Amino acid sequence: MHVLVTGGAGYIGAHACKALKAAGFTPVAFDNFSTGWRQAVKFGPLAQGDLMDRASIDAAIATYKPVAIMHFAALSLVGESMTNPGKYWRTNVNGSLNLIEAALAAGIKNFVFSSTCATYGELDGVSLDEDTPQTPINAYGGSKRAIEMLLRDFEKSDGLNSVIFRYFNVAGADPEGEVGEQHVPETHLIPLMLDAIDGKRAALTVFGSDYKTKDGTCIRDYVHVMDLVDAHILGLRWLLDGKASRVFCLGSGNGFTVREVIEASRIVTNREVPIIEGARRAGDATSLVSGSQRAVTELGWEPKRSTLQQMIGDAWRWSKQPAFTE
Ligand code: UDP
């Protein structure tokens, strides 16, 4: 059984391809290589294409006849979405609309979608679950919420079934070292911190020390990429079993400040993290922490590696491997 994985050459998509293969599916990585890596496509065929080019989606679907779509491909940087919102709305929403229409035209009704806790916005101190109102404060979160709405509309019109996962902060790497996180430019906290520890960059800039939290820095809920993709296999099976569309939050339920992540990195690597105190980054919510057990109780999800120590350790080992070059 083939599964079309958009963004299959990217960080989370490539880990999902590995998990799909291990679960007995054939992942077809659909990617335009705007941010992904050819060397990360190693678990099934590649369908090079672009979600803005409907014909390339139709061609991939006609060739592989997937039973489901896993849709990871998106622009996903909060900061960039604040300075270039048009790019985010156009790419994420129009690309997803093309994909949904192409899937439905081919009779594919199973859709696993990567949404985000950035759809919630500034709800200080609230632990977030699937019923929490979505009031995004950045264009990234806004565009993802819009895609959730598209999926609901096409369920009513065409019977599209979806599992929507709202991710918290995804971190770590495949402990077997076949794939890992590599962004150019890198913008995410843990890889930037490890680069600073390793002297690959001068220092980590802490974005804001005046938030109303215990140490002034933002709180996030970090989840291991391997645990995250395990949930996707369960979500896929949920749909293939004919169960109804459902939203699931994927987080560990534990919130950590930026300074706590810095301290954990110091302990894991046994090295100091050079830091610079910087200004707030536009679009950052104070605190985003999952309060949901739905994935555990309904999907049978068992996060196994989502401790800071494990995530930072796996990312650290990955950072020591030769980087992807193409
Ligand atoms: N962060 C930071 N310095 C950096 C990158 C990130 O202080 O160089 C902070 C950021 O403000 C946020 C947290 O680390 O509070 C996680 O940011 P990241 O970009 O990794 O993920 P996001 O929350 O944007 O999805």
Image (cartoon, helix red, strand yellow):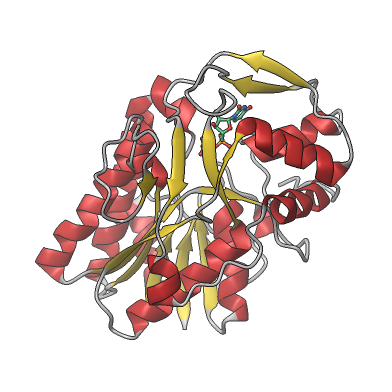
Write the residue at 35% across / 26% down. 85
Left/right placement of residue 257 relative to residue 262 reads left
Write the residue at 62% across / 14% down. 278
Q: Which residue appears farthest toward the left when viewing the image?
A: 157
Left/right placement of residue 208 relative to residue 277 reads left
Left/right placement of residue 170 relative to residue 137 reads right
Q: Which residue appears farthest toward the right when viewing the image?
A: 270
Q: Position of residue 19 (x, y in %)?
A: 59, 72
Q: Position of residue 326 (x, y in %)?
A: 71, 47
Write the residue at 32% across / 57% down. 99
User: Does residue 44 appear in the picture of this structure?
Assistant: no
263 lies above or below 50: above
Left/right placement of residue 231 relative to residue 320 reads left
192 lies above or below 132: above
User: Does residue 56 appear in the picture of this structure?
Assistant: yes
Q: Which residue appears farthest toward the front when viewing the image?
A: 214
Q: Position of residue 98 (x, y in %)?
A: 28, 53
Write the residue at 82% across / 52% down. 317
Q: Position of residue 178 (x, y in %)?
A: 75, 63
State which image quarter holds ligand 1: top right
